[in-house]
Image (spheres, helix red, strand yellow):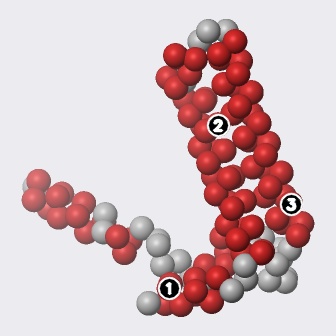
């Protein structure tokens, strides 16, 4: 029984099942309503979200320091959720900025995904 479970887990948790070869890779840096390759509006939207969540995290940390409760900051799941939102939006903004200012990487992404 445990042998089947372990083998099923090993099969499911292989690198090929993690979605690293997602095609097309452009879906991570383009809006679903976007018709052109680049969009300044989508870039500004991603930047605004990243700035907002970064501000929220900084504000929550400042408030925790002012109340002398920073030692307990990381035990609350709300703070972890906000930190994850900040990380996600920062990563999205960085990817869209790279895609917008360096379109030559688009060919490298599609070639790497096909390999």
Q: Is residue 80 above or below residue 8?
A: above
Q: On the picture, is 5 further left or further right than 15?
A: left
Label whose residue precedes the other's in the sequence (2 or 3): 3
Residue 23 quadrant: bottom right
* Label 1: element kind: helix
Q: Work out how far the residue at label 3 is from the one at label 1, CA to CA, in angstroms.
A: 28 Å
Which residue does the numbered mark 2 point to in the structure image? Answer: 82
* Quadrant containing the C terminus in the rendered view: bottom left
State the residue in front, 60 or 31: 60
Q: Quadrant of residue 1?
A: bottom left
Residue pointed to by mark 3: 44
Answer few, some or many: residues within 10 Å of disc 2's Cα (few below 14, many 20 plus, some between 14 and 19). Answer: some
Residue 112 tag number: 1
**For the residues marked 2 and 1, what is the alpha-carbon distance in whole angstroms?**
32 Å
Q: Please give the name of the residue rendered at 62% of the width and 9% of the height, measured from the top-left corner.
A: 68
Figure check: 87 above or below 108: above
């Amino acid at each position: 029984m445990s042998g089947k479970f372990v083998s099923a887990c090993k099969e499911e948790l292989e690198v090929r099942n993690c979605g690293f070869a997602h095609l097309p890779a452009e879906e991570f840096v383009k809006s679903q309503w976007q018709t052109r390759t680049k969009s300044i509006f989508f870039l500004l939207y991603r930047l605004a979200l990243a700035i907002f969540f970064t501000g929220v995290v900084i504000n929550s940390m400042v408030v925790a320091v002012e109340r002398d409760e920073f030692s307990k900051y990381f035990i609350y799941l709300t703070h972890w959720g906000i930190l994850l939102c900040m990380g996600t939006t920062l990563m999205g903004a960085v990817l869209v900025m790279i895609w917008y200012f360096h379109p030559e990487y688009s060919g490298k992404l599609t070639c790497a995904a096909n390999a």
